[in-house]
Image (cartoon, coloured by chain):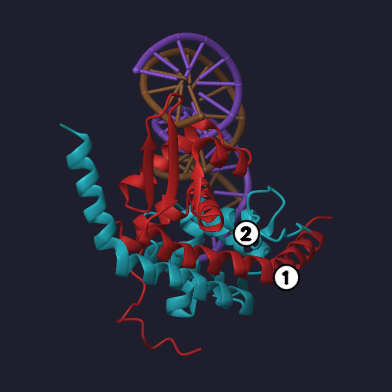
Chain colours: A red, B cyan, C brown, D purple
DNA sequence: CGGTATCCTAGGGGATACTG
DNA sequence: CAGTATCCCCTAGGATACCG
């Protein structure tokens, strides 16, 4: 492996001011990526549908996540002020471009997770008498 | 294994048992992704080099992160038992394939972060009188 | 229905000190 | 140098209750 590109670093997420660092805070959030994924699959979902789709999420975290994603321009929030209020969430154009990246993650997981499991089993077997 | 229905096909990270969910726990970890990135850029690094590259990481978190990544078969740990001990870390083949995904994330961030910033500014300006 | 507001506790993670 | 061990604080986030 050539390591001669050390002074022309492609990856500067090591500084707190790099956009990469902040992206990690956003999509690295468990509920955020799950929300993006859910909206990517279903296209448009109501609050309650999201809550039941993303199993295990509390309404606090769901709301918080949706607000953050809305603020970042990743999801669109459309309110229909009917008698019981109705709110639909969907990905923005920006969100859809992020979806592609999230899907790349998912694909990696599905392909390689068996290897990860094997590595874990081997590690645990070796290191733990 | 999670079954894929016809109209909700690919993405089942919503169940806690799906590999996607566990991947999120790994790469979603701030220090883990930064570590992968660092090793991706530099090829091979000693413990102390990692510590100084990933600015802000404590040795506790660095060690913990390294152990987890090693256990998952993502990084390789090579000990040279010289007088002061020397330990080098590098990405495994599996780790390098994950690096590609992490880089996809980084690229998305660098391309779209201006839009995210604009969205944030607009949101904050609108919602805060 | 789709949230907000409050309380409260598990554990993530920093600082520090010690060891092989 | 490369960790391990301890203490300890702080906040992410679940449970619960109430509102438009």
B50 horizontally vs A94: left or right: right
Q: Residue at x 19, y 39 (%)?
A: B126
A119 horizontally vs A4: left or right: right
Residue tagged by mark 2? Answer: B11
Residue A18 seen in the figure = no
Q: Residue at x 47, y 62 (%)?
A: A99
SS class of the residue under badge 2? loop
Q: Quadrant of the C terminus of chain A?
A: bottom right
Q: How many marks?
A: 2
Q: Residue at x 43, y 24 (%)?
A: A83
Whether residue B82 is situated above or below residue B123 in the rendered picture: below
Q: Nearer the viewer, residue A2 or B48?
A: A2
Where, by quadrant of the figure, is residue D11 drawn?
top left
Q: Mark 1 to mark 2: distance in Å?
A: 20 Å
B122 horizontally vs B34: left or right: left
Whether residue A45 is situated above or below residue A64 in the rendered picture: below
Residue furthest right as drawn: A129
Where, by quadrant of the figure, is residue B4 drawn?
bottom right
Residue tagged by mark 1? Answer: A115
SS class of the residue under badge 1? helix
Residue A116 seen in the figure = yes
């Amino acid at each position: 492996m050539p390591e001669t590109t050390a002074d022309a670093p492609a990856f500067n997420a090591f500084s707190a001011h790099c956009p990469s660092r902040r992206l990690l805070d956003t999509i690295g959030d468990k509920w955020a990526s799950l929300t993006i994924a859910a909206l990517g699959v279903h296209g448009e979902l109501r609050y309650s549908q999201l809550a039941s789709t993303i199993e295990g999420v509390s309404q606090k975290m769901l709301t918080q996540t949706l607000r953050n994603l809305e603020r970042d321009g990743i999801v669109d929030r459309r309110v229909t002020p009917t008698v019981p209020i109705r709110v639909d969430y969907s990905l923005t154009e920006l969100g859809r471009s992020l979806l592609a990246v999230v899907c790349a993650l998912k694909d990696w997981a599905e392909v390689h997770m068996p290897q990860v499991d094997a590595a874990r089993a081997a590690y645990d077997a070796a290191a733990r008498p």
